[in-house]
Image (cartoon, grey):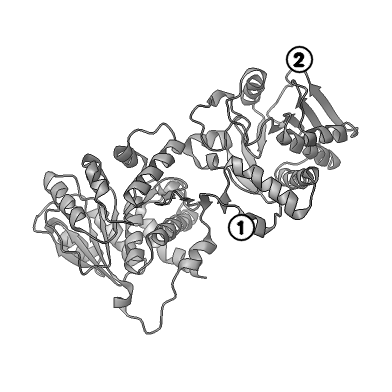
Amino acid sequence: MKILPTNIIKVLDKQIIATESIESIDLMERAAIALSNAIMERWHNDMPVVIFAGPGNNGGDALAIARFLAENDYAIEVYLFNTANNLSVECQINKQRIEEVSNINFHEITNQFTPPILTRDTLVIDALFGAGLNKPLSGGFAAVVRHINASQATVVSIDIPSGLMGEDNSTNIKANIVRADVTLSLQFPKLAFLFAENESIVGDWDVVDLNIDNDIIDDIETNYNLIDIEEVKSYIKPRSKFSHKGNYGHALLVAGSYGMAGAAVLSAKACMRSGTGILTVHSPYANNCILQTTVPTAIIENDIQEKEWGEYIDTSKYQAIAIGPGIGQSALTEMVLIDQINECQSPMILDADALNIIANNKNLLNNLPEKSILTPHPKEFERLVGKCQNSYERLMKGSELAKSANIYIVLKGAFTTIITPDSKFYFNPTGNAGMATGGSGDVLTGIMLALMAQGYSSEQVCKISTFVHGLAGDLACQKIGDIGMNACDIVSYLHKAFRLISE
């Protein structure tokens, strides 16, 4: 699914109008019907509705929604804010239409505004401003927002919570943004919906389908996309009946140190559950018995050091290399990792402590093999690029790094983000809060390693692995619940996730 920046949404509207030979007011009517149906599915008509409509097309949508809800016996009160006496053409038309409906309590605010009482039983429809906003709300509109937020009413925002900007909210004023319980976005989600700092503003969000011709959508270019199961399924390679383990690659996993054998175990198990032909795990000698007994399907290669990674590895026989889970940051390990990166010619997957070592030796970023994959969580990422004040800045800094180093960055979290060297952003929709547990990232590294060993491109590795990882977590959560989950449960459901995608 595409995520369109707000400036492109305006272009899309014009293309729909031109291609379908439809008037703008009729497109608004179509949107209002879809939005009204979504509202009626969630809230019964015994709940009084108060609508706050702005002077633009977002307000026009709300006025049309008021008519449809009134037709279905909802008690409707509408406040249209027209303080500048400057309604959009479509909003003006819908104002005239609503004035002809007798069972709607309609108020046009041109000067003074007496706020209505909003109770716990009230449904507020917020349509003051849409996604085109480019500066913080102030003055009277900010006061209306604060009145809504101070109430205990249920709030549904149309397209986007009023006051929230579609992408970058670095200069915004959070107190002057509507806090929605539900946001109904038109056709596409907004980029801002995917950022952690906006969760309490957006609430639960859903996309309302406007039945736009697929050819029109396909022609619209965007750098932001949500990964979906059909895309992932299209990448999965069928297996020949006459294939053997050599056809699915030999993977090398460098993981673990004394006391951190679990990271190596989780990553190795995930790798073997994700289709690699052969896996060699290189780990300190102290982890030998643990690995031999817990991952009997892997080859265990002991380091010359007992408790840490301290041995350079000839990687020429491997199709994929992953380094980092649980390796620690000792001086010896740091020295060996630097040598390993400087000598390696093939793409690598670098995670956890490997990233922290790179953060202490930032010149290594210029020496990474092209198409390598870094898998940081936000704190690890900031050690690499510096402090980020919000998620949008994090994406922009990630894009700069991915482009300059010609690598892929998998920024972990809710809606894990894949950042490509050509400034594309892919957001993963699978996963849940139960995956916020130690070892979850080690599992992801193992999946990536297996896919890279099987010959998938770096971009495909990132997309498939993040989707499968989250899907396995979702399947585990259905059985266990998000509180009781741990990383072992994700591994246990990997085979079901792959099967579900394949089927």
Q: Looking at this view, is 201 or 321 the one in front?
A: 321
Classify the position of the N terminus by image quarter: bottom right
What's the mark number on residue 156? none
* Residue 461 in the image: above or below residue 45: below
Q: Earlier in the sequence, mark 1 or mark 2?
A: 2
Q: Is residue 331 left or right of residue 70?
A: left
> Can I make out residue 501 in this image?
no
Residue 28: x %, y % from top left:
76, 43
Q: In the rendered image, which residue does mark 2 sit on? A: 112
Q: Looking at this view, is 368 or 240 the one in front?
A: 368
Residue 94: x %, y % from top left:
82, 36
Q: Which amino acid lies under the numbered mark 2 shown in the image of this protein? A: Gln
Assess whether mark 2 and mark 1 are in contact (beta carbons under 8 angstroms): no
What's the mark number on residue 218? 1
Residue located 12% across and 52% down the image: 307
Q: How many residues crowd mark 2 within 10 Å: few (<14), some (14–19), many (20+)? A: few
